[in-house]
Amino acid sequence: MQYDQARWTDASGDKYEPLLSEKDSTHVEVESDLPDHLTRDSLELPDVSEPELARHYTRLSEMNYGVESGPFPLGSCTMKYNPKFTEDLAALPSGAVHPDRSPESVQGNLQILAELEDYLARIGGMDAVTLQAPAGAAGEFTGILIAKAYHESNGEERSEIVIPDSAHGTNFASAALAGYDVVSLPSNDEGRVDLEALEAALSEDTAALMLTNPNTLGLFERDIEQIADMVHDVGGLLYYDGANLNALLGRARPGDMGFDIMHYNVHKTFATPHGGGGPGAGPVGVVEELEEFLPAPHVRATDTGYEFYEPEQSIGKVHGYLGNWLVLLKAHAYIARLGDAGLSDASAKAVLNANYLGKQVDYEIPFGPYHHEFVASAGDQDAADVAKRMLDYGVHPPTTKWPEIVSEALMTEPTEIENKRTLDQLADAFNSVRAESDEVIAAAPERTSAGRIDQASAARNPRLSWHALSDD
């Protein structure tokens, strides 16, 4: 199908008129006590029947691609399938709990949250966990605030955070937002931390080193214990970005490597929803020395049940209630359902799938051995064009152009959910595009409902109305 302003055209040339159009609308007069500059005189709403509305949204859903449509190897973002049983749990009426209820009236909820804290602490090798942070980036920021409070409690005004050049952009943003200067750390020829560069970067001004392990190339930092010692020797803290924790589940723990603080991306690791701007969760784990700085309130068990309490030197509240309750409930259910053996099996399959797929693709993979993801190079092809052409083969493309230490990067992570058939489907898409000419891939996509768009203009001038695009 091809996009033609307000119409969709299929292969036969038949055109579909938009189901919602201006002629099917109702004007509603609006009265409000708000100031005039915050109101409008009338509101125009679509006036359609239920079947028309259902068909409209069904058609829109069929134009989109998601993890339930097919393989989704978006490297680093880790688009995992969200099992339906967790959604069923979150939809239970008993789960709809007002955040201002007294602790005595929500003991079951507090038990689930306390158990999840314990699950995550044991998985990460941490001594305590807060569930408040509502996303991975918010978890980073919370963790850095904890580190800052720790140093200030020791009478130290440290000013720098060291971050590898391949780190997620949110690492740099979180450090800067917390008031720190960022020291970028170059990678060595193997794609790992350059120990000489690290030694030169560390000083008494170093508050923390933020590190992902395995890193964004899927490579395990083999010198992690030495790295931890180097950071601790100057009085700094080692922060673990949990983006790639799904490669280690049941096999290695950041706490055992020497990390002092970490955040968990529950959407990447424990299959809660990802993307779409909806609620997320980025719990933060700490070692015992940092427990007193956790956000308040915190949950703890007593002889008679569960209660809220405020850690002695808490950084304060970072999110409403104790975090996004229903997302946390899904993470709890996922972990409880899989158990120790299931989590370990998930990490094994994540690594196996990435390595199998990597062996099948014709593109060069310059760094290895890798774990749950790999970064191939598109070589003389443009990675963005490759991605668009892969859409024509019925799969979602990998992340492109990042990390920049790989030329024309194709960052690929199939996750543990895919079977051999879908991995072969992905490999076929990669290899088909690799064999095509620049002219062919530059014209892609050709078989999707929307052709190539001006992404910059679309981002800067979004059309969010239900009106047909031709109605200007």
Image: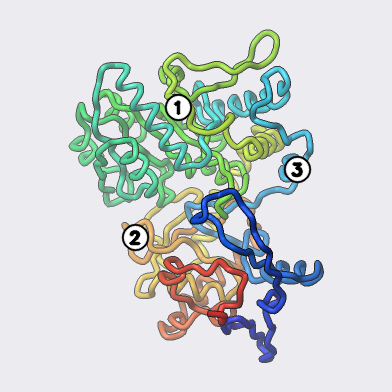
For marks 2 and 1, the one nearer the N-term is 1
Q: Are marks 3 and 2 in contact (CB under 8 Å)?
A: no
Evaluate whether residue 341 shows in this view: no
Residue at 47 percent across and 52 percent down: it is: 76
Residue 66 x/y as whole percent? 62, 61
Seen from the viewer's position, the closer of residues 399 and 44 is 44
Q: Which residue is mark 2?
A: 406
Seen from the viewer's position, the closer of residues 160 and 395 is 160
Q: Which residue is mark 1?
A: 256
Evaluate whether residue 255 shows in this view: yes
Q: Secondary structure at mark 1?
A: helix
- Which image quadrant is residue 142 in? top left
Q: Identify the residue at the far top of this view.
A: 303
Residue 172 x/y as whole percent? 33, 44
Q: Give the vertical position of 190 relative to 392 (above or below).
A: above
Disc 1: CA contacts within 10 A as few (<14), some (14-19) or many (>=20): few
* Image quarter hosting the N terminus: bottom right
Residue at 40 percent across and 52 percent down: it is: 217
The mark tally for this picture is 3
* Cα–Cα gap, marks 3 and 2: 43 Å
Q: Amino acid at mark 3?
A: Ala
For marks 3 and 2, the one nearer the N-term is 3
Q: Give the vertical position of 171 relative to 116 (above or below).
A: below
Q: Secondary structure at mark 2?
A: loop
Residue 91's label in the rendered image is 3
Mark 1 or 3, closer to the camera:
3
Residue at 42 percent across and 24 percent down: it is: 315
Relative side of 180 to 128, left or right: left
